[in-house]
Image: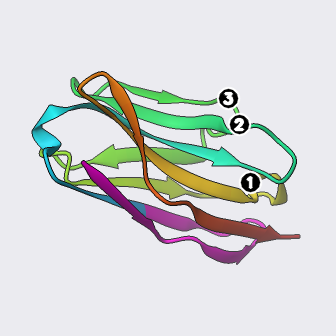
Amino acid sequence: VQLQASGGGLVQAGGSLRLSCVASGSISDINAMGWYRQAPGKQRELVAMIASDGKKYLADSARGRFNISRNNAWRTLHLQMNSLKPTDTAVYYCNAIHRGSGVWGQGTQVTVSS
């Protein structure tokens, strides 16, 4: 499976962005998808994840501001980010759990100015 992320950009604090990840290939074997982010000098961290049963996980830093969603066929994953803060600045990566292994898309840069 291949993942293509898009939607990053530069936004002022308090603004919103919607990230998208399009999956192609054997998407029927995807069990879960999520978004990670990596800020300069920091480790990559999980932001949000959604499982095949629809259950969602949001990191504490994202809860109340971000929402993860997908279409039923796993073809598209979204991350709606509201009330963005400068601390949300990072490269955001799409991830899929495919046949028990993690697959990464390329990152998309999100920059939040104060």
Q: What residue do we see at 76% from left, 59% from top? A: 89
Residues under numbered marks 3 and 2 in contact, where contact means CB atoms less than 8 Å apart: yes
Q: Is residue 39 above or below residue 33?
A: below
Quadrant of the image occupied by residue 23: bottom left
Q: Residues within 10 Å of mark 3 (few under 14, many from 20)?
A: few
In this picture, which residue range is highlighted in magenta? Answer: 1-19
Marks 2 and 1, Cα distance to the nearest angstrom?
9 Å
Q: What residue do we see at 46% from left, 53% from top? A: 79
Q: Is residue 101 above or below residue 87?
A: above
Residue 108 visible in the picture? yes
Residue 83 visible in the picture? no
Determine whether, in the image, residue 53 is placed left or right of residue 107: left
Q: Residues within 10 Å of mark 2 (few under 14, many from 20)?
A: few
Q: Is residue 24 above or below residue 14?
A: above
Which numbered disc covers residue 61?
Answer: 2
Residue at disc 2, secondary structure:
loop
Q: Which residue is mark 1?
A: 88
Q: What residue do we see at 82% from left, 52% from top? A: 87
Determine whether, in the image, residue 13 is placed left or right of residue 92: right
Marks 1 and 3, Cα distance to the nearest angstrom?
12 Å
- Identity, as a three-letter code, of the amino acid under mark 3: Asp
Q: Position of residue 100 (x, y in %)?
A: 30, 21
Q: Position of residue 81 (x, y in %)?
A: 56, 56
Residue 93 located within the stretch drawn in magenta: no
Determine whether, in the image, residue 58 is placed left or right of residue 83: left
Foreground pick, 43 / 61: 43
Which one is earlier in the sequence, the residue at label 1 or at label 3? 3
- Identity, as a three-letter code, of the amino acid under mark 2: Ser
Q: Which residue is mark 3?
A: 60
Q: Is residue 60 above or below residue 67?
A: above
